[in-house]
Image (cartoon, rainbow, N blue to C red):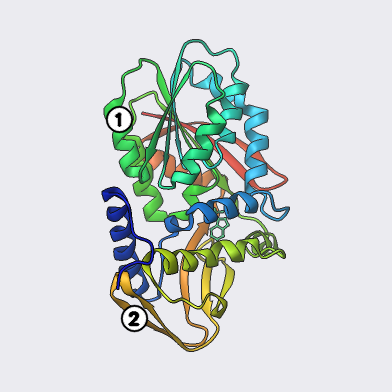
Amino acid sequence: MRPSVAPDSAAERGELEAFAGDVEYYLTLTPRQLPSRYFYDALGSALFEAICQLPWYRVTRAERRLLARHGRAILTRVQPLSTFVELGPGSGEKMAALIQSGRSRQGPLTVHLVDVSAAALDLAHRTLSALEDAEIVLHEATYEVGLTQIAAERQRAGRTLTLFLGSNIGNFDPPGADAFLHHIRAALTAGDALLVGTDLVKPAHELQIAYDDPLGVTAAFNRNLLVRINRELGADFDIDAFRHRALWNAAESRMEMHLVSARRQRVRVPASSLEVGFDVGESIWTESSYKYQPQHVVGALERAGFRFADQWIDETDGFALTLAEAM
Ligand code: TRP
């Protein structure tokens, strides 16, 4: 059987094959999993933007406050700056706010945006196109591929500031985070800078409601992954038969997001040549969101070949921005 929507370009066909292959691989692991990067189709990106406005999800607001308050100090530390890179720019508003807070900058800027989601890139591009004297370069790619492209294209003198915000780093497990920071370091030159935003460990009930909100927006965001698999891979997930579950794993210092089967059922995923049985209560683990202690962010950066420069903490919402320099 063919996927229900025919791809109209070789690139899209390649992406669909990668998606089908990932679903086949991860859904048959024990415990069953799905990679979180597939959350961000057009609807998923819109739902995530809505999550960022929920009163219970404070990551985005806390980070924006820190950037507004300390943006100038951040940029002053890394002058002369000619290039900005953002991995996962979302709406592009944080990057815009940061660049605008350093109004005194001189000379042209290059801004590279890397995201697997065309919808996110499109939105960020629109937000940032208002900036004067800035060339925006879009990389619809994984972070790794995007970083490699940027390193190869590099031409301007001056330093590069890479932003990895929104506690995105928390979606890697600790070895994955270390490997990814090494990867970023390898794409930079000594003196370049990295700004990382991390959500901090906080009381369990605050974390719980941030990832399982009373309006059900986070549940919709999580379950939309199954909607996407049905649409793009021709699967027959009964969306109503999977419940969103968020739980705080204190031993691992992470929130875990799951989709839990409400009944015994079989699901077919034709494009992945897959048929999977679910018991009642059996779950698909879709994402982890690790929560950090401020000094652990510094440790991870130092292990990856960065020198600590500064750290700004929002005590109200428990969030840290950490600036480091490539050694
Ligand atoms: N990077 C975000 C985070 O870990 C993504 C996110 C927010 C998320 N809410 C979610 C992922 C719910 C899965 C389910 O905070």
Which residue is found at the position 36% from the left and 38% from the top? Answer: 184
Which residue is found at the position 58% from the left and 49% from the top? Answer: 199
Q: Is residue 111 in sight in this rendering? A: yes
Which x, y percent locates residue 176? 37, 53
Which residue is found at the position 28% from the left and 75% from the top? Answer: 273
Viewed as shown, does residue 247 lie left or right of 327? right
Q: Three-letter amino acid code at disc 2?
A: Glu
Secondary structure of the residue carrying tag 1 is: helix
Specify the quarter for ligand 1. Answer: bottom right
- Among the two numbered marks 2 and 1 on one chain, the one whose residue lies closer to the N terminus: 1
Q: CA distance from mark 2 to mark 1?
A: 42 Å
Q: How many C-alpha atoms fall within 10 Å of the one at disc 2: few (<14), some, or many (≥20)?
A: some
Q: Is mark 2 within 8 Å of ligand 1?
A: no
Q: Judge by depth and name the residue closer to the eye, 249 or 171.
A: 171
Q: Which residue is mark 1?
A: 151
Nearer the observer: mark 2 or 1; the answer is 2
- Quarter of the rendering containing residue 25: bottom left
Which x, y percent locates residue 213? 68, 63
Indicate whether 36 appears above or below 268: above
Q: Which residue is mark 2?
A: 275
Which x, y percent locates residue 65? 68, 36
> How many marks on residues?
2
